[in-house]
Image (spheres, grey):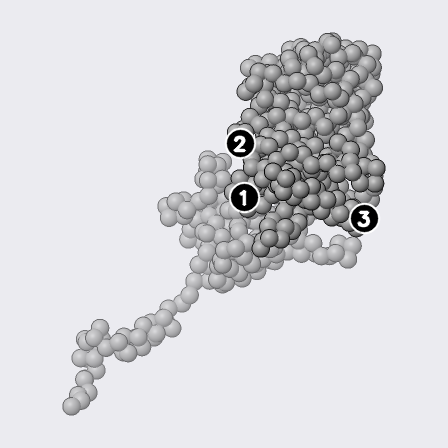
Amino acid sequence: MEFRLPANLQTKLVAYDPQLKALVRTKKESTTKKSKYPLGNPVDLIPDDIIPATALQNAIDSINQHAAPDRYREFVKVVNEVTITYAILYHYEQVWYAAWLPPANKETDYIYGYTYAYKDTATTRKALPYAINHLKDDCISKPSGRCTFVTYTQQVTKQDVINGKDTRNWNIPDVSAWAKKSRRLHEPINRFEEQVRISIPQWEDSRTMFERIKTTCIADLLTSNHNTEYWTTRNKSQWLPSLDVVFNFIKEDDTNSAYNIIENGAAYKSILHILDTPFFRKWIQNKCNESIESFNNPDNDAKVNILQPWNVIFHLCSQIKTIHDIWGDKCPLDYYQTNLNALLSVTVDLSYRNKSSFPWLVQHMPVASFFTWINKFHEAKETERQASPNGHYRYYKSTHTGLYINPFIELNDTMSMVQTVLESKGELAPPKRWRITEFHDYVQAEAWKISNVNEGLPQDLFPAPVKVQHNEQQWTFIQPIDTHQLAAWGQAVRNCVGNATGYAEGVRKKQHFIVLCMIDNKPQFTVQLKVSMGMMTVDQIAGVSNARLTDEQREDYTQVFGQALQQREEVLASS
């Protein structure tokens, strides 16, 4: 059954009729006039000498009719055949934002201008960014139609930036590139930002676009603490780096005082008498002069050219102090001068954790040997660097000092192990020769003995050394008697057989043999052998430093080892 409701009853029951209700809603919407300015029609967003009033109004009208992702207008012009964004207007989260570059005749008056405006309602005020809300007392009210807009406009000058107004005011809401509602808006904002960047002086190596403008004097770059009491009695604008300034920093600086305007200045008091010599006085002043010349050079666009000579001074102080902390005045002053390049390049970590090993070094190691080490290491790294024209160089060029820095890792490891041995045994016999590689291997073996218990190893194959004469050479085959002897062998032939626990463990479990071979009492070969079905085979064999055997060496070894096995067979047969 179906019943056609009378017209009045249809109206009365429209809430029960989904289709009729939708039709009524559509009719109401079609008769309701849309507001031309749902986002408002703010005034004075951009000066007339930047954007004519008619063009600005057209932009406001257009933005009012668009959805959130497209509520912006980018103003561009062609300069020297390049299209640039010189102004931008957008609406984002209930606030209007505008930013512009000064016209050609006012470029020296200000860097850029910006305005923000929002409806003076409680709802809008709750959604304001902090950067806007905390300046509400500086804003002015401007009526527009039926509503009132709160507006703020500023033309940001160079002095404003120097005084601290260095935020990106063309992007106060921090519009992101990833959000759906702002990803299209982000691009024109970035294009405007790039024009601001181009319009002002820049350090090419700065992370912030206003840093060069904020650098009003060389002290802004060279001193690390700009708010210290040091400046209450000094004129920062007239301050220049100099020998006297460096010495005063070292004499007066204290990490617990307000005078700490360079890092660890007071730490270098112990070496002041070394620096206060004709050679280093001249060297320090020359570095200060280099910084001043770079700062005054109008063609210099990199702040590192100013910073690096200054930083090198304190890098050298740190290097000298490292050596002086150990040998003190037992190190002749001329050693620091004649080894200057190595001192600047090679870094060693003779730090606090190795401090208790310093007396041992003073007692046993001539400071001349230490300088020989770092000079040879420096020369080797320089040769390596110069042989790598394409930049395939292991160590890095420090942006802090401009120097190629070569950490002496082998020496650092060695000193750490010296510390381990001294803490455990209380003594360590000095080496016969101060060669860094030999010293490292010697100390490594001693340190290994401390951390590894000495355990006996079976000697079923060669319980006593077997000697074989071959081509006027005496070959000797032995099995290591214990794990410490195996470690000593690994040190002698420079391989890991003594430190890798798997080799000794395999010998103990009789999974394989380790045979050590000497020729004329000099360590030569390390051999790992296995037995299967009565056959002994060489699993691994290596020369000194894991060198592979030549065909001739392999042939000799096969022949001589066969003779050693025969000798062992004869001993067993006669027992």
Q: What distance separates the C-alpha of mark 1 from that of mark 3?
A: 30 Å
Task: Read off the residue under disc 2.
Answer: 455
Q: Amino acid at mark 1?
A: Lys
- Label 3 close to label 2 by CB (< 8 Å): no
Bin the neighbour count of mark 1 within 10 Å (Cα to Cα): few under 14, some 14-19, many 20 and up: some
Q: Is residue 418 something one can see in this rendering?
A: yes
Image quarter where the N terminus lies is bottom left
Image quarter where the C terminus lies is top right
How far from the left and from the top, in percent, is residue 557? 75, 45
Looking at the image, residue 278 sits to the left or right of residue 272; the answer is: right
Residue furthest left in the image: 1
Of residues 500 and 30, which is closer to you in this image? 500
Circle 3 sits in a helix, a strand or a loop, which is it?
Answer: helix
Task: Read off the residue under disc 1.
Answer: 510
Task: Read off the residue under disc 3.
Answer: 552
Q: Which is more N-terminal, label 3 or label 1?
A: 1
Residue drawn 52% across the image and 47% down it: 174
